[in-house]
Amino acid sequence: MCGIIGYIGKRKAIPILIQGLERLEYRGYDSAGVACLPIAKFDRSTDGQEGSGSIHPRFCVYKERGKIAQLKSRINHGFPDAHIGIGHTRWATHGAPSKVNAHPHLGPRGQIALVHNGIVENYDELKSELKRKGSRFKSETDTEVAAHLIESYYHGDLAQAMRLAAKRIKGFFAFVAIARSEPGRICALKRSNPLVVGIGRGEHFIASDVSALLSYTKNVIYLEDNELVELKSDSIRVTRIGSRKRLKKKVSRVDWSVEEAQKGGFRHFMLKEIYEQPRVLEEILEKRAVGKNTIEFDTISAKIQSRLKHTDKIYMVSCGTAYHAGLVGDYLFEDEQLARIPAEAHVSSEFRYSAPLIGRNDAAIFITQSGETADTLAALRQAKKRGVLTIGIVNVVGSTIAREADAVIYTHAGPEIGVASTKAYLAQLMTLSLLSAYLGVLRGRLSKSQLEKFVREAKQLPRKVSEILQNQSAIDQAARALYRKGHFLYLGRGYNFPNALEGALKLKEITYAHAHGYAAGEMKHGPIALIDSEQPVVCLAPRKSRTYDKMLSNIEEIHARQGIIISIATENDQMIKRRSRFIFWIPNTLEQFSPILTAVPLQLFAYKVAVLNCRDVDQPRNLAKSVTVE
Ligand code: M6R
């Protein structure tokens, strides 16, 4: 996790670093800091260290515990005129969230300043070695160890010192560093964790992701693993860590606007992103469902198409909400009305340490919003080693998983900033639905007329999601009545079992209430013991479903035990209405699309409960948007 940024150019560095950090805050927000090299003497006392009598100014370092706002209010009292600097927003791994553990960290003589995203796995061993040589550490972090290590190799050439240090470091990282005696150069290197260079006129930027750069430039270079970049205001030099040969790097153009990455009048990013869902679905359909009975995936080449045609089995590998999308994918791919391919959804952190019987004729799909999730990335790399076809279903363009998979299908949800995934989830569900129909056609299971019916219904979904968004009074009522409850159960079957898990995840991550999702058929095997007149149970029961009657029986059972039933049901379903304390209506749709509709009231309910509890909706405690550590 953690967000890092660097700037070199003619403008004042500090405001640029702070603004960049605000955009990266979703990656971690327990402490933040910046370091810069002022161009003139600056008298204000700082957290920086005294240099060793060099003519170069010493670093000015500012750090605060908590969010960027804290750091900003301190810096607003006055900051030095500097044209080079680095910044960091932290999600603690080694050492508690505190000012002293916040980055940047300096070397022992204050010669270099370093920010880091990742983990130095052998930091203990390196720390003991450096201590024996005289290093004294102020923080508990692995990053300070890396700063001391780099400085121990530093003899006037920062890039060289970083190359040598990288050879000693086990683990994964993105490092950005500046040296006191080289005020015209930023050096950065990466192994596993993302770094992107922003190209300006007479200025350059580097950050964990493009959202930090969008106000300044749309021209970027994505760094690959084991690449080192040296940035001056007028040049960029990229080399491999182990070589000095300059690499030719492709410049990419980012098409997200700054506005797209901002709140646009909504109280929270999460709410804005929930409201963007009809548009997101529309865009996916415009791109993929081009004719009345044609589905296109422009990034699936003829070669990949032919491998997919003969694939024995599809594995879907992902984490959190994206895992729930994988579970829906499981039902979609195996559906006898669609592709009818054996499919299995796995949690990435389990998959990467298991020994799945995955064959060369199988395909593995990695579903991820960020494209940077550490476990999903590790699972992808393993699958590639086994020679299976790998496909990324990814939101963030140019992210590591997007680049490393054999093929990438972008979900086109736009930037998702709220930690709780909403529009990215719906985009994943829509993409998987269309992919399963596409494979159904490819494998000769779905006729043109069946596809036409499927596409026709898909095209109604943006309007149907809008309808749900327009009528939230029942959701408001339920949230007001139940927001103090500490325990919730979520039940669903078939296509809506994954959404029972997703509804529970959404509620717990942003409200901190305990919530548990179950396959409704499992009720009698234990959870029914929880039901009494105080227990809220959210029941997902859309009408068009193979298991509708079974779900109705489950609702009866909860009703008989006086449980508080909150149902998500198809408009005008009086049977369910009679037994429910609260009912959230959804329009009728095909069973295969029902998770796209049932997800929306679940998101809104979690959001409203969180707001009533005054929770930090967009940045819930202990979480980060992009989980780049195991
Ligand atoms: O970026 P990814 O889709 O790979 O992230 C996976 C999970 O970390 C993510 O879905 C997480 O569970 C969200 N906080 C859920 O709202």
Image (cartoon, helix red, strand yellow):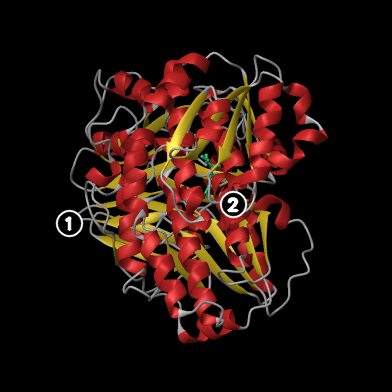
Is residue 262 depicted above or below 621 in this figure? below
Determine which residue is flagged by label 2. 495
Q: Specify the amino acid type for callout 1.
A: Arg
Q: Write down the quadrant of residue 561 in the picture.
A: top right
Q: CA distance from mark 1 to mark 2?
A: 51 Å
Residue 615 appears in the picture as rendered: no
Residue in view at x 81 percent, y 31 percent: 526
Q: Nearer the viewer, mark 1 or mark 2?
A: 2
| In this rendering, position of residue 61 left or right of residue 568 | left
Measured as percent of width and height from the top left, residue 455 is found at 39, 66
Q: Total marks drawn?
A: 2
N-terminal label among 1 and 2 = 1
Determine which residue is flagged by label 1. 201
Q: Specify the amino acid type for callout 2.
A: Tyr
Q: Write down the quadrant of residue 396 in the picture.
A: bottom left
Is residue 112 depicted above or below 190 in this figure? above
| In this rendering, position of residue 336 left or right of residue 261 | right
Measured as percent of width and height from the top left, residue 248 is found at 36, 74
Is residue 349 depicted above or below 578 in this figure? below
